[in-house]
Image (spheres, helix red, strand yellow):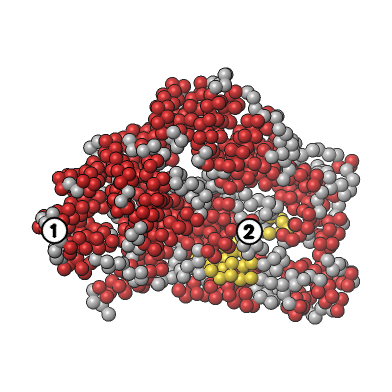
Amino acid sequence: MGRSTPLRGRSDQLSLGLAVLRRTVRSGQSGIVLVTGEPGMGKSALLDALTCEAAPLGFVIGRSSVDEIARTTPGAPLLMALRSGPLASAGAGAGEIAELDGLSARPLTFMDRIGEILERAAAATPVLIAVDDVQWADQLSRTALSALPGWLAGHPLVWVFTSRDPDCEVFRDLTARTTPSTPVTVVPLAALGRDDVLQIARDRLGRPPSEPVRRMLDGVGGSPFLAVQLLEGLLRAAARGEPADRVPDEFIAGVRRSLAGLDPAAADVVRMASVLGRTFAVDEMAELLAPRHDHASVPRHDHASVPRHDHASVVRYDHASVVTGVEAALASGLLGTAGHRIGFRHDLVRETVYGALSDGARRRFHRGCAAFLIDGGHSPLEAAPHARLSVTPDDEDCVRILRDAAEEAVPALPETAGKLVTEAFRPLRPGSQIWRETGEHCVDVLGRVQRAADAVHLAETLLRRTSEPEATARIQVLMSRALWLTGNLGDSVERIGRVLALPGISPALRARLEAARALALTGHDASAARAVAPAALQQARAVDDREAMVLALQAVGEVGRNSGHHLEAMAAFRELRQLEGVNHVAGEIIELQLLDRYEESEALIAAALADARDEVEAVRPSLLSAHMWHDFNLSRLDDAESGARALICMSQELGGHVYELDAVVVYASVCALRGEWERAKRLVADRESRSTADDGIRKPSLRLMRGWFAAAEGRPADAVDILAPVLYTARESRTCWPWWPGWTRLLLAIGTAAGDERFAKEALTLAEEGAARNPGIASYEGIAYQTQGLARQDLTLLEQAADTLGRSPRPELQAGGAADYGKLLAARGRRAEAAVHFDRAWAIYDRMGARPAQDSLHRAARKAGIRRPEWSAGAGSARPTHGWAALTDAEARVAALISAGHTNRSAAAELGVSPNTVGTHLRSVFTKLDVNSRVQLVNAHRNRTDESFGIR
């Protein structure tokens, strides 16, 4: 099916897009086309042309555009694309697509379901997703449009997006993430040359344009849209028998004259349509301008009493007048039809009409739209764009809409939620009841969406105007959460203490304050926190206040974890999980790992994933982080690396970076254990460059990593300087990191190498206290024996360490215990016994791929005269970077499943991971095997299988 009108002046740009479509048909490779250009440059026309050419190539097409006014509707562009044309039947049934409407509050599930639909459609035929004006996309849509091309890499999927802003978030993200399997083609549209504009005129008029028309076309600035609008105006004028030379040469003036020539009902139809910002049905416009019942937010006016062109009034019309007005607006050419709906022919027309409205008229029209949407059963989030543009001081109706919309937006659109609740509060008069109520809600929402500094500032503003104790207590509890996020815990403790001294605070609020104070103390005064947290929990239970119990249980758990009392911490986190559900399951899983209870940890991870079933949102970043640590601690380094990369990718895509730090630490640790020091250092340095927190206290893991790197480079004195702030604060329970099994062994070695007796002694004491606080836990008791044995060079203690660590579920600790005992045995001349322990340690390190540890063991064995020729073949050998041998075990499993015909979702179900994790593995597989599509992967896998059976 060809285009009826040639696309003049855009042949090169069209060719770029067609090349991507044809490559996808030929190879099955994904592709991304980004079309940029100022308004009126023909982006939509080029999109039309590409979709028109795609159909004969066998593509099923999903097409949508984004409305500027309705852009906060979560996921609307993708939902519209799925419902459009052949894609609706090729990808999913109506029921499955309808179900997506209720998933906007769960962004991971929303994206996963859409990915599944597109993956299923692309398995049968190439798919084109075309979205116009993505610069106006809502936050959920921006996230999805940026992430899904990577998630679905290798499928025959082409994504074509247009934007008037070449630096919009979607374009920026996609350009930054381009890979060989998802190449990005940028198509900029500049102004047309004069010859191209004249050729458009010849196409439209059927003859060469006259000299007056040429002069008018010179005034469109090379804009194909304005040229077409001008030419259509000429044709309409000729049809009316008017001289063509009298057509105005400025489009904006023409729009305004057209509007001025309409009767009041038709003019208000056009104005209301410009404010509504989307297509509409005649009945909807009638409800807006001739409602069957009063909208409280739209003033009633008598039609006869309103001047003909009084823009400051919103007039009520009867139904017949509105219908007649719609017909007149269509006849004027300002509006056009799109199926059974009506809208502007182009955004520039709408923008011109909207720009001509006075501020007062614009507010009243927006109020009418907000009320219409709410009365019609639409969500507050859909009405919010109109409410925010019409809100006035003490406007309870619009404020309520914005507050409800912010609450609705928190899970999927945190950035939007923060903006909406702030806009609800900003116009209110200080001191009023609605000002206080909205202010408290604003502090709460800002804290929940991680805008902690803004929440603290607003809470301070509220407190300055609040004298009533109950209100002061409520605000302070909300503020304490924000102060926890900022790390200003001493300030939080002082503030809460002052509020607790006030009379007249209810028992429930007093319990919340005490719990919040206990939580703040966990990062400020360890001994005080340990004293008050249990009492705060007891008080919360006594008043049976859920919020107080959540805060108090978190405080008890933090106290236990930071001080190394892991049985206490696990009990608190387990109760918190039972109270709050999946949100806190990760805390319990981590504590099980720290207690050597890895079977229980694995069972709880599996149960959490099973409970999630198809609800990907239940597979939260916190659970993925706990799963990653589980693999790392068990020395499943390939799986740990894969989990870390998936978690980093998720953090970047979803904008939540709480667990990205843990993922970077695990990823860098895996690299270090393999001897990839430069890569490990780059990972940590990049994360440090993006961190504004004090890493000496709040980010100790980064200091531990840098100290490790310095020691590995033979700079133990520098390592001591880096690590001292972490080590000397560990016993004050302000951080849990140095208590983790394994670090104290490294810290002791660094202090000994640097000749720093105090540092080494502190590391030894920490190991001993860790064992005392966790009796019967092999990892802690074994580390205590190991550090004591090393410090004293005591064979008996190192033998006990090797035996005890041999019962630990952590392979690296097992190997370390055997290696240290073997080295001291060798130094004492007991080579035969040493060789037994060396062999054991070597086997574990070899399974791990821990090359530096193997090198160290090899040197110790040679020094002792122990010869192991088979070690030389393996020592120092690193995994290649390309080819099948470069794949990790997890990547190899994914490659095999995808080659066998699995989708991302079915492969994820087989492996017990999320589809997003499968997508992360698959992108790595493509890079290492130098393939760009699933078709190429299947062929590569088949060829490898044939070769393994000797088939040529």
Check the picture and name the quadrant holding the C terminus.
bottom left
Q: Nearer the viewer, residue 790 or 242?
A: 790
> Which circle marks residue 835 in the picture?
1
Q: Nearer the viewer, residue 783 or 712?
A: 712
Residue at the spot of label 2: 135
Label 2 to label 1: alpha-carbon separation: 66 Å
Secondary structure under tag 1 reads helix
- Judge whether residue 422 can be spotted in this image: yes
Is residue 694 depicted above or below 837 in this figure? Answer: above
> What amino acid is at disc 2?
Gln
Q: Nearer the viewer, residue 528 or 438?
A: 528
Q: In x, y percent, where is residue 37?
A: 67, 67
Is residue 198 depicted above or below 137 in this figure? Answer: below
Kindly indicate whether the residue at mark 1 contacts the one at mark 2 (C-beta within 8 angstroms). Answer: no
Instruction: Tell me the mark number nearer the camera, choosing from 2 and 1.
Output: 1
Q: Determine the residue positioned at 20% across, 60% down.
A: 860
Q: Determine the residue positioned at 44% across, 23% down.
A: 539
Q: Determine the residue positioned at 32% across, 48% down.
A: 756
Is 163 left, or right, of 602 in this rendering?
right
> What amino acid is at disc 1?
Ala
Secondary structure under tag 2 reads helix
Q: In x, y percent, where is residue 916?
A: 43, 56
The residue sitting at the top extreme is 504
Is 857 left, or right, of 878 in this rendering?
left
Within 10 Å of disc 2 (Cα), the crowding (few <14, some 14-19, many 20+) is many
Q: Determine the residue positioned at 84% across, 75% down.
A: 215
Check the picture and name the quadrant holding the N terminus.
bottom right
Q: In x, y percent, where is residue 200?
A: 74, 76
Is residue 193 depicted above or below 475 in this figure? Answer: below
Say whether disc 2 or disc 1 marks the residue closer to the N-terminus: 2
